[in-house]
Amino acid sequence: MSKSKKRKFTLGEKRLLLGGFRLATLSLALIELSFDAPQNSYMPAVVLAGGAIFYSFFKLVHPLRWYTSPLSGTALTVIDILVCATLVFAHRAIHAPFALYSLNPVLTAAMMFRPGATRAITSVTAGYYTLDFFLAPTVDTLTSISSFFATYLVALGLTAWLPYLVNSDTYQHLRSSTIAEERLKLGREIHDGLCQTIYGLRLELQMLHRDIRGKGHLDKRLRHLNGLLDIAEKEARGTIESLRSFRDDRPFLSQVEDSLKCLKGQAGIEYQLEAISGEPRLDNLVKIEVLRICEETFRNIAKHSRAGEVKVTVRSPNGHLQVAIADDGRGMPDTRPAPGHGLMFMKERAESLGGNMQVFSIPGLGTEIRVEVPRKWSPELATR
């Protein structure tokens, strides 16, 4: 019996969840302020309400991808906690109107950060709310105080766990969409810059060849330069095609096969693609990075291996993805990735997913690249 696939929320739905929760808790706070204005507040009710509305508007309009940067993500979270703590402490009462509003940083952290950060922010929120209980004038009964506190703790716990209950992966979606956008942007820059430069050089060489026609040794050098330009243009256009080819709604194996077809068309290298476990179910970020490793490997095979055939084997055992790419080329004398070399970048990509990459090569017999990564990406698995 096949397992039913969990429905994953889109980025728009997740943004709607964060915005809806903030608006709902803001509305409840404003309603309570209008019916029960604070008597001992450090600030007038109109100032509290106006500040909360202005800040909430800012939180609704700023891009979620700001949270993917460590610096801006940390700054936004600290500011959010400070604003919420100010709104809670300013009321000077056991039950502050902005108590539920103070849960917003917890929900945001649970959707955008790793679980450790969420636990830390949850603890800070619980800490300052508990402190408010001790600092506020006590006019309620012990039963009432206990009820407020227990209700708040239950709401805090549910808020922290909500994204996990709905299978949220907002951070990963943001990162994968950012990578896809950067690939398209880089493809356009290569087309508008490098390809146009190559075209200009080709025209100049043609004019030069016409001017010096008949001088044998120069003709030979110019033909050699034209050949190098042909190679450079082919590589540049192949890079543009691979940068533009990724689509997260297409199966992984289909995109690998497209790259292999491109390899065959450009370099005449035959290929075999074998998927032992069928189509693997991958997180988008894992799919992007492994495809880039495959594309870099295919480019290296076309440029350096002198291979006649390449075989790609894909397995997905025990929650992992294993990809082996073997060619029958001339092999490599040294398989250790050197700094600044393509192999080093490929290894770093695999490690960024919590996986590894190995290179096996026998001079004269060929090379095999083996990549193994978790099929589901998690920040805790990634190496820095």
Image (cartoon, helix red, strand yellow):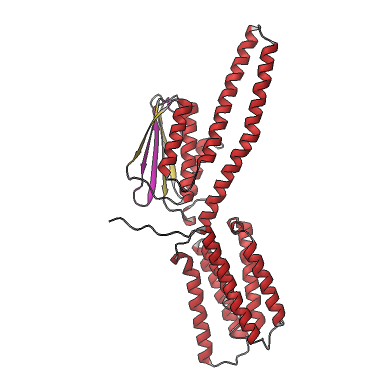
Residue 336 can be seen, yes or no: no
Does residue 95 lie above or below 141 as drawn?
Answer: above
Residue in the image at 58% along x and 27% along y: 233
Residue 78 can be seen, yes or no: yes
Is residue 50 toward the left or the right of residue 353 in the image? Answer: right
Whether residue 316 is in magenta: the answer is yes
What is the quadrant of residue 324 in the picture?
A: top left
Residue in the image at 50% along x and 48% along y: 352
Range of magenta residues: 312-337
The spot of residue 202 in percent (x, y) is: 64, 22
Nearer to me, 142 or 224: 224
Residue in the image at 44% along x and 25% along y: 268
Does residue 25 lie above or below 65 as drawn?
Answer: below
Split into 4 quadrants, where in the image is the N terminus? bottom left
Q: How many marks?
A: 0
What is the quadrant of residue 92 in the picture?
A: bottom right
The spot of residue 105 in percent (x, y) is: 58, 69
The spot of residue 54 in percent (x, y) is: 69, 70
Whether residue 371 is in magenta: the answer is no
